[in-house]
Image: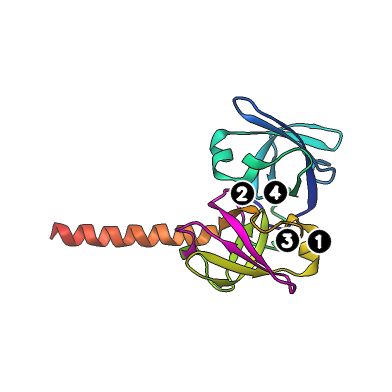
């Protein structure tokens, strides 16, 4: 579990294809106390550490994860957002983030005041509300405005400088994770509605 507060800008050192793709990522801060088996967030994707050496770590990425995230397109030299998992005594500076990608978004507009507009895939808009939370490439952000196929966020200079979002080009693809609470509420309400319909039908 993460909070969406990026701790470090890391660098992709190597991408090694295979049955699973192995990523080597440079991140001296997040690897300072990491061990094999630990989890680290890379651009909002929760990955398991395989090896740690000299300020870098390696992680295996399955075809499922590559198919659902922007990690399929990373290359050596790319910059990525890194975060270690939260602990029970951590401050919750952002919101509860699982590191599970719900869909890919596209940067459509960038304004001088730090406002960014992202296009989103069908089906995600129902989870977005004004002043609600969303995770973009591992960054916890507040939704300013949301439509059927887009949402906007307003970033302060610190966030633009401390994450990949400050240098992302128009058309860049990002990993999106909606607020997990919204998904659970939808599931519970759906189950309640189904139960009610079933009971009524039995009558």
Q: Which residue is mark 1?
A: 161
Reading the chain from its start, which is encountered first: label 4 or label 1? 4
Q: CA distance from mark 4 to mark 3?
A: 12 Å
Q: Which residue is mark 4?
A: 85
The C terminus, quarter of image: bottom left
Q: CA distance from mark 2 to mark 4?
A: 10 Å
Query: Of all residues shown, which one is farthest toward the left?
Result: 203
Using the rendered image of the protein, determine whether residue 3 is visible from the camera's viewpoint: no
Pick the front one: 106 or 24: 106
* Part of the protein shown in magenta: 97-125
Query: Of all residues shown, which one is farthest toward the top?
Result: 19
Q: Which residue is mark 2?
A: 99
Which dot, 2 or 4, sits closer to the camera? 2
Reading the chain from its start, which is encountered first: label 3 or label 2? 3
Residue occupying image coordinates x 53% and y 52%? 102
Which dot, 4 or 1, sits closer to the camera? 1
Q: Which residue is mark 3?
A: 91
Reading the chain from its start, which is encountered first: label 2 or label 4? 4
Which SS class for mark 4?
loop
Reading the chain from its start, which is encountered first: label 1 or label 3? 3
The reply to whether discs 4 and 3 touch (Cβ–Cβ < 8 Å) is no
Reading the chain from its start, which is encountered first: label 4 or label 3? 4
Q: CA distance from mark 4 to mark 1?
A: 22 Å
Reading the chain from its start, which is encountered first: label 1 or label 2? 2
Measuring from the top left, give residue 92's x and y in whole percent. 69, 61
- Quadrant in the picture for residue 156: bottom right
Residue occupying image coordinates x 56% and y 73%? 130
Which dot, 3 or 2, sits closer to the camera? 2
Pick the front one: 30 or 10: 10
| Other-residue count near label 4 (Cα within 10 Å), few / some / many at <14 / 14–19 / ≥20 | some
């Amino acid at each position: 579990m993460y909070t969406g507060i990026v701790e470090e800008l890391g660098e992709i050192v190597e991408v090694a294809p295979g049955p699973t793709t192995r990523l080597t990522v440079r991140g001296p801060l997040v690897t300072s106390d990491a061990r094999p088996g630990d989890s680290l967030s890379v651009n909002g994707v929760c990955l398991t550490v395989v090896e740690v050496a000299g300020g870098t770590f390696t992680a295996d990425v399955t075809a499922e994860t590559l198919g659902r995230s922007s990690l399929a397109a990373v290359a050596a030299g790319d910059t990525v957002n890194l975060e270690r998992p939260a602990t029970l005594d951590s401050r919750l500076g952002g919101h509860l983030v699982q590191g599970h990608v719900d869909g890919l978004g596209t940067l459509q507009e960038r304004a001088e005041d730090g406002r960014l507009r992202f296009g989103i895939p069908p089906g995600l808009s129902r989870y977005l509300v004004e002043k609600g939370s969303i995770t973009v490439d591992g960054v916890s952000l507040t939704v300013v405005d949301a439509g059927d196929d887009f949402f906007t966020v307003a970033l302060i200079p610190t966030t633009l400088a401390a994450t990949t979002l400050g240098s992302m080009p128009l058309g860049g693809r990002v990993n999106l994770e909606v607020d997990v609470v919204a998904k659970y509420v939808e599931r519970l309400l759906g189950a309640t509605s189904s139960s009610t319909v079933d009971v009524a039908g039995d009558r």
